[in-house]
Amino acid sequence: MTRHPNVPRRLLATLTTFATALTLGLVATTATPTAEPARAATPAHGDGDVILNLFQWTWDAVAAECADVVGPAGFGYVQVSPPMEHIRGTQWWTSYQPVSYRIESKLGTRAEFANMVATCDAAGVGVIADAVVNHMAGAGQSGTGVAGTQFSDDSFAGTYGGQDFNDCRSNIADYTNRWEVQNCRLVALQDLRTGSDYVRGRLAAYLDDLVSLGVDGFRIDASKHVPASDLEAVKARMSNPNVFWVHEVIGAPGEPIQPSEYLGSGDSHEFNYARQLKHDFDGQIKNLRFIGDGKLQSGRAGVFVDNHDTERNGESMNYKWGAKYVLANTFLLSWPYGSPTVYSGYEFSNHDAGAPGATATTVPDATCGAGQWTCTQRWPEIRGMVGFHNAVAGTQVTNWWDDGGNLVTYGRGSRGHVVLNNTASAVQRSFQTSLPAGTYCDVVASSSCSVTRTVNGDGWFTASVPAYGALAIHVNARG
């Protein structure tokens, strides 16, 4: 995907003071839209462009993981959960009900957030923040947020009053009605009047504040529920209107609102990609060859196997699929379509359950190994395939072959080669590649190059691929 520069680090000190003033409402924003069209994809940062979504990880835990695992593995970015103050509660979705734009949440303080961004940056990893811009906390609620801010149905102290919410006070019932989807309440959440100049300014100030702390871009939550023109207007108010955005737009057949509408202010997530992965890995993966057909242009599509919503609602695969889930992530990181995000969350049986050990106001640091956190980024197969993705960047698919069903193999030019076996039996056979002769580490089978594959002078190698397993070799991992 096309890359573009972000806010230079030398400007951050200047932006900090200005953005803080914006957040407090002390400065009016008058930025005009740039004449340049919205840029696609993540900017260059560190070793690559793969995003790791560390869902509900605390800022301290993210910082440690960036230094010890994420940076060394070659991820370009971490995506973190919403950092603003929200309602109290143990459920994960409390993070998506803002009460103010203070950077104080159950995942950590403002100082801890800033330290996390700096630590990740030092490890070559950028930070993308999940940004809630469509709504505030649910209607009918009142109390204090996790940082002490008072709020009630139409009053969020120091931020919004009743005039800042849309007039429709009913929940969305008809998703074929564009006006209702974008002006009424999503599951009883107070819907912001994003057509208001004041609301646009407050949203832009909040995003600018995060950029001043070093954030590189944003996942815009629930974009589908905000008119695309309103989001373009918010972005135009930012100090850097070219900062990376990727929109959550859950397009569905027959609905009037589709992801392509939002490309004027950023990329969009392609939910049909995750849906097809689920369908094909539950059927025949030979069809993966055409996974980009009928979807967003590759350079504007954010793709994933699962995210925090789809893993719970059954729309996609999730960690409970076991070996097939690993296979799907192997495909995600080896196929040249879209900008990939690897998801890392926690085990669950109750769909509302918060992170392991969560209280109404805090979340313990994630623990990998013995706990309930999935820690996908530490799986040898994922680490190996992030390296593969970085090694084959910019190459096209070569040497595609399939058995008409669930065994596929393909190369990435003369840089790498992959085999996926979505069957219950091991497969032994020879594979044709475009790789130079030599001995290569199988980066899926081992992180220590204990398993190698030897390509002969004609580009062939012979190997046994385990049931529901994969094989991947590339030129940056030689035996």
Image (cartoon, rainbow, N blue to C red):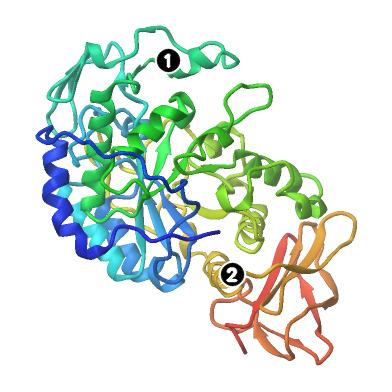
Q: Nearer the viewer, residue 465 or 116?
A: 116
Residue at 30% in and 65% down: 121
Tell me residue 180's x, y (percent).
Answer: 49, 12
When the figure is inspected, residue 282 is found, relative to residue 199, above or below; the finding is: below
Q: CA distance from mark 2 to mark 1?
A: 41 Å
Give percent across and percent down for residue 409.
79, 67
| Residue 175 rendering spot, x and y as whole percentages | 57, 17
Residue 86, by quadrant, is: top left
Residue lying at 68% horizontally and 47% vertically, measured from the top left: 277
The amino acid pointed to by label 1 is Asn
Secondary structure, mark 1, is helix
Badge 1, how many Cα within 10 Å: few under 14, some, many 20+? Answer: many
Q: Which residue is mark 2?
A: 393
Q: Give the amino acid type for the residue marked by disc 2 in the picture.
A: Ala
Determine which quarter of the picture holds residue 289. bottom right
Q: How many marks?
A: 2
Foreground residue among 274 and 44: 44
The residue beneath circle 1 is 183
Q: Is residue 289 left or right of residue 474?
A: right
